Each structure stands twice: as structure tokens, then as C-alpha cells.
Image: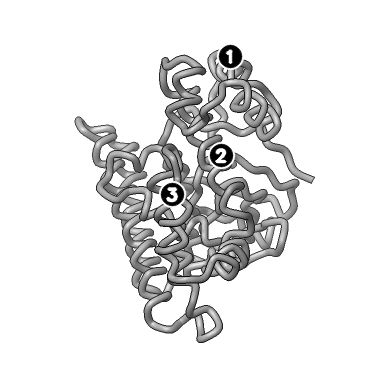
Amino acid sequence: MFFQDLRLQNELYIVQKFGALTDHEVHMHDALEISVVLNEEANFRTLKRDYYGQSGDVFLYRPFEPHFNLTRDSSKPVEWIMVLFSPSVIRLIPEGYKLLAPFYAVELYSPFIPSDSVCAAQVRASAEAAVKEERAREPGWQAKQWTCLIDIIVAIYRHYHLYSTSGGAGEEESGHEGIIRSIEYLLSHFAGDVDVEEMIALSGLGKTWFYRSFRRVTGVTPNVFINKLRLQQASSMLMHSAKSVTDIAFECGFHSLSYFNKEFKRFWGVTPREQRRQAMHSRPIIGD
């Protein structure tokens, strides 16, 4: 149904794209992805459902989510800006990982942001500015792209934060604000020793209800969530640093090299060393 062999060769990739396909097998990768529709009608395909967007609409693809961007009419190729970035690039931004919470609360927030929202307009303006910087390639253009990425992520975070605090999620979801706090905690602490009691306390929920709610919001248990974050970070470090596999394993929160190797191969299908070797000898594969 899908394949899992796409890798970011750079930690940030922003490009304007065209597509005329109305059907295609979905794929997945370890990057976070944001699509901004510029012209015509787009079909954002995931395993669960199709979403349809028009000019100005924004769509978030969650980590490890099989997907593909399509056009609704092959005679009218869709044009969009694709923003791909590794979660690890956020590590140097104050409270950076906290800003990624909307990408992981998969069952709470819709990945679709309509064009008539303030957020969508801000994201489109920043994405277009980033594309313009790469085309012009004036001194400092890469730094400018990073500032555009920060503007995009902050706009998205504020959009969903406003949604969750304004009652937009409904009374049934009122307890989910605490789960978001626990997600933010895990995003900031996954590489270290996670304090489970502190995580639950942040949620304001009882232990049993916390685990049920966490799985409902994220789609996975806290342990699986942490493991995926660690493997995602390790994958990025293998391709973008010269650190040894052992150092990467421990830096990403694994206390056993053999366990790290086992989990990495189980999730990615190759060992850490094989992935690094493949990345060094393959041409960049960077997105849709």
C-alpha cells in the first residue's frame, strides 16, 4: 500500500511544485510536511481519508503518515509549495519542540487549515517568501529561509492553540488540553529520562484516564510515542552528523546499543549503519 524509503538529505527543504496525477500510491517519510496550495484544486490523500483544498489552503502531514499530493482534475495541474523539515531542526529554538505539538495530536486537530483563516494567510506569505529567497540566492538566503520556517511553525502553533483554548474542540475534548501539555513535555524531554509521574501530573488527569486519552489524541501509547521520536531523531543525526552510532543511540535516549539497533531495524527496515551508508551513496530523495 505504501513505501517508506524517502529520506531528507537536508534538514529543511522548501520548493514550489506542480502535479497532474489524480491517483498514486501513498508514501511516507520521517520529515514533517506542510503543503500550501497556490492554484487549482488539490487532493491531500492519506490512508484514512482524502481532503480537498483550493488556493490558499494549508495541509499538515503528520510524522510517519502515508500520504500523497494529487490534483482533482488532470487537465488542471495543481501548484503548491511544499515545506519539508526534520523535527531536529527545532532543537535550537527556545521551546522549539513545544511548537511541534499540532503535528502529533493527530486525533484532536484537523490537518486542514482553510484559506480564510489568519494562519493560512501567514503560512502562505512565509512559504512564498522562502521560495523567493532560494530563487534569488542573495547572500544570507538560507538564513532567511530558516526565519520563514519559524514564522510558519509559530503561526500554525498559535492557530491550534487558539482553537483548543476557545472551545473549538467542544466540551467532549475539554480534557485534551492536559494531553497537549504532556505531548509538549515529551517533545522536549524524549531524549532524556522521561519522568512519567511528571508527565501525568502535567495532564491533570488520573493515571488510567491519562493513558486512554493520550492514545486517543495521538493514536499511540506514550511509550510508542517516545520511541518514534527517538528513532526519528536518530535517523536525522545519522545523515546530518558525523557522530558514531553509539553516541547517537545514547544521545537519543537509548541506554542499550543492541536495543537501539534492534528497534531501528524493526522500524526503518535497515540497521543504523546501513541507513548511513545508503544515504552517503544515494542521490538526495527529498519529497513528493
- 200 or 57, which is in the foreground? 200
Judging by the rendered image, the residue that carries numbered circle 2 is 30
Which residue does the image show at 55% across and 35% down from the upper left?
Answer: 231
Q: Which mark is residue 249?
A: none
Q: Which residue is mark 1?
A: 277
Q: How would you rate the neighbour count of disc 1 (Cα within 10 Å): few for under 14, some for 14-19, many for 20 or more?
A: few
Q: Residue 164 in the image: x percent, y percent?
A: 42, 75
Amino acid bearing label 2 = Asp
Quarter assignment of residue 77 = bottom right
Amino acid at dot 3: Asp
* Kind of element beneath mark 2: loop
| Structural distance between the alpha carbons of marks 2 and 1 | 17 Å
For residue 198, which quarter of the picture? bottom left
Residue 127 x, y percent position in the rendering: 37, 52
Q: Are marks 1 and 3 in contact (CB under 8 Å)?
A: no
Task: Report, in whole angstroms, how far the alpha carbon at label 1 lies from the one at label 3.
Answer: 35 Å
